Image (cartoon, helix red, strand yellow):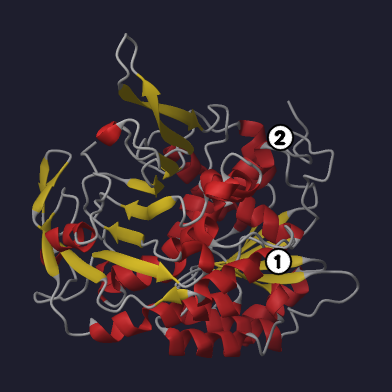
Amino acid sequence: MQDSETPATPGTGPSVAPACTLVVFGAKGDLTQRLLMPALYNLAGAGHLPAGFRVVGVDHNENTDAGWREALTETMQGFTRDDTAEFHPDRIDEATWRFVCERLRYHTGDFDAPETYRALDGILDGSAIFYLAVSARFFGPVIDHLGAAGLLDETDGRFRRVVVEKPFGSDLASARALNARILKSAREEQIFRIDHFLGKETVQGILALRFANRLIEPAWTGEHIDFIEITAAETIGVEGRARFYETTGALRDMVPNHLFQLLCMIAMEAPASLDAEAVRDAKAALIAAIRPPVGDAVRGQYGAGREDGRPVPGYRDEADVAAGSLTETYVALSLAIDTPRWQGVPFYLRTGKRLARRRTEIAIHFKRPHAELFGVGAAPNVLRLFVDPGSGLAGSLNVKRPGPAMALDPAVATLNGSADALPGVGYESLLFDAMKGDGSLFQRADMIEGAWAVVDSLIAAWKDAPVADYPAGSDGPVAADTLLNRRGHAWTPLPAE
């Protein structure tokens, strides 16, 4: 049995995070239970957390240290029995979970009460990360209070950082206002605007794939690439979150954050170095080069259909949805990027709920070979990067069919993520990087505002515009197919699972 004062797999090198306290606002919330705690468990199991690591959970609901630990233990054990959960291990390792559990402390407090922060000041005596796993309406007030209480002051060698979840604003004006507000209390380097898509293994590997392979790097331009698809498809509906979704919709919820971050990784120029600011400079430059998709966008809303063979209601029949709601549950965009590398290359982005298959992937469609030796037999090569579920890539090549005739067959080479990889939830590397102070995978203020600037015109145009209907369990509205067909392209199908 391992000593519970050390991680389950003791860390002995630079892969161990510095000692700090993680203060989680929203300790009893869904994000904390479903994602943050599994991520900390995985980090502990891999030996990345030091003995001096602590967690303080803050929430307005009355509870005790023991009560919070017991509730989280039940939740973690429940994941082993739920094969639909994002975190679904075969078992929970007792020593690893004990290492985490013994470091949990609960603090009851109102997020908008100064005394909550005075009490935290008495608890904290070193470096700390404040994680805002709360509704967006609390982002500004919590950071205001942290600043007023002196909790963001970095003295005596300690660091103080804030991790902010999405949605970061609801349009360009609100994002600018929120940035201005929080930067009155903290420096930009202290703010870590998180996007869990960037914690996925495939996404983190894109830079290595693009810039560490001479086989690929020269072909990653409009001279060789015909078009690129980025898909984030879900089979679930609003799942009891309709009140939030009614005021948000698929465009705000997914495009300026998740999808644009994938777009940055695929399309940005090589950064000057792997330093966080150099990487973020390259991303910010790419976002600034995106042309607003005026006239090149489709919005849809799911109607009644079938999921896993069972009937499911349409969006307007979901609880807490207005009968005549115009909220979109599907978005498809055709984007152009004004850089020499991407002249003439369309980027097609789509995301939606109640689609035929859960899939997040990027598909790079190359042009047909120059030589006409094989006529129409040489199909375009396609490189697909699988982000979720699972990770890996698949590339199609044209090879000679066995036999005397010179005929071609497609061959697909697949590289899957390691079968020995931790059952991660996408937050592990992000939390670890925040502890180390590495902002490479987090968004700066200019990136956030640049992304909102691209979609602001759509937000205004879609305010009272009708939405195209699509049946639940389908690939989306017909209009999305038309968006690509007019340039001779087509989406990769989403076959039902």
Figure check: 143 above or below 12: below
Viewer-proximal residue among 391 and 211: 211
Figure check: 214 above or below 332: above
Badge 2 marks a residue whose secondary structure is loop
Residue 259 spot, x, y in % from top left: 42, 62
Screen quadrant of the C terminus: top left
Badge 1 marks a residue whose secondary structure is helix
Image-based side of 100 in relation to 14, left or right: left
Is residue 183 visible in the rendered image? The answer is yes
- Determine the residue located farthest toward the top in the rendered image: 404
Mark 2 or mark 1, which is nearer to you?
Answer: 1
Q: Which residue is mark 1?
A: 278
Residue 358 spot, x, y in % from top left: 31, 45
Residue 128 numbered tag: none
Residue 125 spot, x, y in % from top left: 82, 68
Residue 8 numbered tag: 2
Is residue 32 visible in the rendered image? The answer is no
In percent of the image, x 47 and y 70: which residue is there?
166
Residue 241 spot, x, y in % from top left: 29, 65
Viewer-proximal residue among 203 and 170: 203
Viewer-proximal residue among 100 and 377: 377
Screen quadrant of the N terminus: top right
Query: Does the residue at mark 2 contact the one at mark 1 (Cβ under 8 Å)?
Result: no
